[in-house]
Amino acid sequence: MSLPTPELPAPAAPWPAPTFFQHLLRALRSVVGREVIRFLKQPSRLGSALVRPLLWLVVFSAGFHNVFGVAIVAPYETYVEYNVYMLPGLLGMVALFNGMQSSLSMVFDREMGVMRLLLTAPLPRGWLLAFKLVAGACLSVLQMVVFLVMAALVGTEVMWQAAPGLLASMLLAAVMLAALGLMLSVYVRQLENFAGTMNFVIFPMFFISPALYPLWKLEESGAWWLFKLAQVNPFTHAVEMLRFASVGQFNPLATGVVVGCTVVFFVLALWGYDPQRGWIKQKGGA
């Protein structure tokens, strides 16, 4: 009499292979999560990012409180305090400096070999650079929101009912300036060269803009060449987009310029990081 043969359990069904969309989500979570965690582990970085615009807001608003007395500046329909006028420009300053900080971070990662590992991942290079762009923009928006709250706490009038539109404009400005930093990271080959980038990119963009004073002040003083440079400065349009959004208005020209510059900067960065055609091929490294 033969014993019954025990039935073997059926083999477990194999896990389905992750789809391309799942790969993208994992890469996005990894890249953005790495930047956010590194930022949260450096509280001094947040402090240094907020001290600069807060000093400008408190000191300059006290020293130049009566700087506007000739005309009403658009989009305001009446006279406003100087700290209210400065607020959009200082929000742009936060995003501008964080965009350059992201550029510095990418240069550091390239020297340490992290960028080489990232760009050799089995995903299209454009997606990986876009995720770095998203990470930089998220950090900028976080810092801008914190600065906006602190500005309100020190007495700056904020139109909170315009917050949704302002938040969207902050995101667009942050993406454009992060794309600018991404593009600059292609051409800044060493950390020692970053000081030159600060002097020749950040400060001219900030000061030749309506961040601290209206452009008609330049035109009225006869500085035509500065007035024309300010008009073609991408940061000018980012500030104007934020200024209109802060009072619940939409500036289609400024928004269009910001979106267009974002596309141009990102395409140039994508071309620069292409090992077949860009700057990396010329220098022979990733």
Image (cartoon, rainbow, N blue to C red):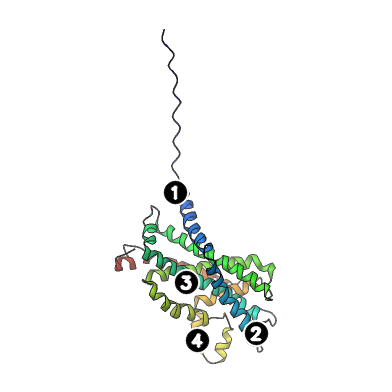
Residue depicted at 45% across the width and 70% down the height? 181
Give the side of residue 65 with respect to residue 97, left or right: right
Give the alpha-carbon distance from disc 3 to disc 4, as whole Å. Answer: 23 Å
- Which one is closest to the eye, mark 3 or mark 1? 3
- Which one is closest to the eye, mark 1 or mark 2? 2
- Which one is closest to the eye, mark 2 or mark 4? 2
Q: Secondary structure at mark 4?
A: helix
- Which one is closest to the eye, mark 3 or mark 4? 3
Residue type marked 4: Leu
The earlier-in-sequence mark between 4 and 1 is 1
Residue position marked by numbered label 3 in the rendering: 100
Relative to residue 66, is residue 119 depicted above or below?
Answer: above
Q: Residues within 10 Å of mark 1 (few under 14, many from 20)?
A: few
Q: Secondary structure at mark 2?
A: helix
Q: Residues within 10 Å of mark 3 (few under 14, many from 20)?
A: many
Give the alpha-carbon distance from disc 2 to disc 4, as whole Å. Answer: 26 Å
Residue position marked by numbered label 2 in the rendering: 62
Residue position marked by numbered label 4 in the rendering: 226
Q: Residues within 10 Å of mark 4 (few under 14, many from 20)?
A: some
Q: Is residue 64 visible?
A: no
Q: Nearer the viewer, residue 235 or 98?
A: 98
Q: Position of residue 111 (x, y in %)?
A: 36, 66
